[in-house]
Structure formats: structure tokens, C-alpha cells
Amino acid sequence: MSCLRCGFHHNCICDAEPRLSCDARFVLLTHPKELNKDTNTGELMLRTLPNCQRYTWDRVNPPTELLDQLRNPHYQPWLLFPSDEQHPAAAYQAADSKQPLFVLLDATWQEARKMVRKSDWLASLPRLSLTPDSTSAYQLRRNQQAGNLCTCEAGIALLQLLGENQQADQLQHYFQCFIDTFHADKSGHSKL
């Protein structure tokens, strides 16, 4: 029987799960196709970061609660997404008395581009781009593009950007534990 929390059958990784703390808020705007994928790393953030929420993206009906948060003057919203000519990226700077609210598109890159293109309310958010200093360790899906990060790796990079290096290291360790265990567990045997 699979662990109800981590989902692994033969290699439960719950003992590696950290309890993180960070003042910033993280919002995973998840494409509906991602919700039941066992390769979804956004789940790792949801399990470990107390200020992490998930909303399901809908082209026609944006999540009302998320829209309210984005309009809330207590938050400083950012869309984590590559810049383009019409939407240049801004350098992250903390705003006095505002809590950072990072919106991460929890989807494949093809789906994420479609989500931004079909959601005017997302396109209006200030964009924050990350330049990874290492290549992605995420190899659980085909057609991964060089220079792109999975959702959890993006969360780790955001924690580093905030100077939360200990939190980032703990999430990185948990993510690596997930990656190292995934194939063994799905093959039906214990990790060596």
C-alpha cells in the first residue's frame, strides 16, 4: 500500500520531509493535467512550506481567492516566468511592509506558456525571471529543455533569492530524496 503522504509504495520518504519556515507566500497555479501526476514536484513544496497554496488554473474562471490575494495591498505579487519584449523581468526587491507573494506556474513549459497567454490577469503581474546557476536535476519527464527548472527547483531558487539558504538547502535535500527514490519505487523495489 502506498504512503498516503509521499505516495511511494516501497520507499517512503516522509522521514526526509523538512518543516520549513519562510515569511514569503508561494502560490502554485497548477494546470489541471498536473494534479494527479506522480512526477509533480509542486507537491514537495505544498508538504513543506507553511505559506504555500495551490489553485487550479482555469482559462475561463480564474480562482477568486487568488485574485483577491493579488489585489491585497499587504502582498507584493510576482509571477515567476521568463520575460519577453512586452513583459520585461524586474529585479526582485522587497517592498517595505509587504509580504512577497510568488506565483509559480505548476505545469509543463508548453502548458505554462499557454496559461500566461490565455490569462490577462497573469500577464499584468510583474515578472520575475531566475537564472539558474546549475542545470536541473529533474529528469522524470521527456522533452525537458535546458535551462528550465521544475516547480520545486524554482521554489528552492526563490528561497535562495530571499536569503533563506538553510530553508533552500533543506528543500533541496528533500527534492533530491524524491528524485533518487522515484524510479526504484515505480519499478517495484526498494532503493539500494
Image: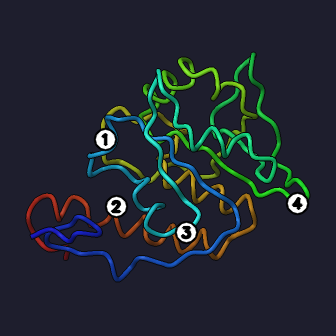
Secondary element under disc 2, as helix, strand or loop, is: helix
The amino acid at mark 3 is Pro
Sort mark 1 into few (<14), some (14-19) or many (20+) by Cα contacts within 10 Å.
few
Whether pointer 1 and pointer 2 mark residues with C-beta atoms closer than 8 Å, the reply is no
The residue where tag 1 is placed is 141
The residue where tag 2 is placed is 179
Ranked by sequence position, the earlier of labels 4 and 1 is 4
The residue where tag 3 is placed is 50
Residue 140 location (% of width, % of height): 31, 48
Secondary element under disc 1, as helix, strand or loop, is: loop
In the rendered image, the residue lying farthest to the bottom is: 15
The amino acid at mark 4 is Ser
Distance CA(mark 3)–CA(mark 2): 22 Å
Distance CA(mark 1)–CA(mark 2): 12 Å
The amino acid at mark 1 is Arg
Distance CA(mark 4)–CA(mark 3): 20 Å
The one nearer the camera, 94 or 61, is 61
Name the mark nearer the viewer: 3 or 2: 3
Ranked by sequence position, the earlier of labels 3 and 2 is 3
175 to the left or right of 27:
left
Secondary element under disc 4, as helix, strand or loop, is: loop
The amino acid at mark 2 is Ile
The residue where tag 4 is placed is 97
